Image (cartoon, helix red, strand yellow):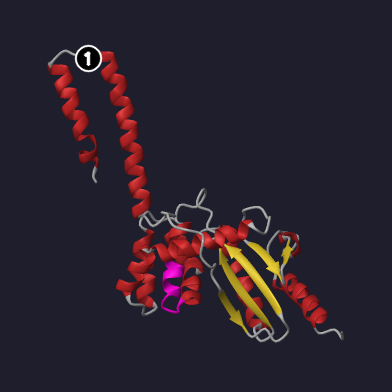
Amino acid sequence: MDTKTVIQPYIMFVNWSVSSNGMDRRFLVILTALILIFVGIFVFSKNSNDSGNNQTGSSQVQPTNHVKGGNAKNVTLVEWGDYECAVCELYEPIVNQVFEANSANMQLQFRNLPLISVHKNAFAATRAAEAADLQNKFWEMHDLLYESSNWSAWTNSNNARSLFDGYAQSLGLDLTKFRADYESSKVNDLINADSAEFKKTGQQMATPTFFLNGQYIELSKLTDETNRPTVAKFQALLDAEFAKNNAPQ
């Protein structure tokens, strides 16, 4: 339904009222203002839905399970992230380096936590990652979204979806399926389920949030004196966990 369709009945009513002198002019002004506010809300809501930020769906489904690694030493690092979060983008190369150095001995899991109140394209980007996962390309899309030049482009775009389509094509995805999955309630439900699962942790809704073998990690334990994350800080925590899990029982 377009804007013209929404306001057409009102226009007819006003024309009738004026022609019949049956309505006070001041009342008409007030009524017109109220109708315009309503139309503005309607148009904004429709545009939000078209952009891929519509969250309609159920959270009563199983959360995502994006895991990679060998886990020989029973250590799992979980990151709750928002693709549009600048701090997450800062952590991304560090997390990748840590994982590559320890991939045989640990698992890395990524969970969705798009903070849509502050990031206009966060939910849409999460849709793109989950749609790619339905063609077994989650981590590849995940990496493209966080890649520095891509990240700067789509986070500032008013048409991020067209960029996501381009990323999907570069990964060799079936674009028709990708677009359908991107719009699907299934993808919405997966994202909502992750958000619902995060609330159970009792932690503040902030990204990135890390857990190591189920234990929350304060970001101060992962950063240097300039508040930048370091591989050494991550590695120290992993080594402590490796030692703990391999100690004689």
User: Residue 34 is drawn in which quadrant?
Assistant: top left
Q: Position of residue 66 (x, y in %)?
A: 55, 74
Foreground residue, 14 or 40? Answer: 14
| Quadrant of the rendered image containing residue 243 | bottom right
Q: Is residue 207 visible?
A: no
- 240 on left or right of 101: right
- Looking at the image, the residue that sits furthest to the front is 60
The quadrant in which the C terminus is found is bottom right
**Quick check: 194 above or below 3?**
below
**Region of the chain picked out in magenta, as a range:** 128-137
Mark 1, other Cα within 10 Å: few <14 / some 14–19 / many ≥20 = few
Q: Which residue is mark 1?
A: 23
- Single out the residue that lies furthest toward the left: 19
Amino acid beneath label 1: Met
The secondary structure type at the circle numbered 1 is loop
Q: Residue at x 23, y 44 (%)?
A: 2
Q: Is residue 32 visible?
A: yes
- Measuring 41% from the left and 70% from the top, which residue is drawn there? 131
Image position of 202 (left or right of 159): right
Eyeballing the image, is 121 above or below 21? below
Residue drawn where x is 14% and y is 22% of the image:
16
The magenta stretch spans residue 240: no
Spot occupied by residue 202 in the image (x, y as percentages of width and height): 68, 55
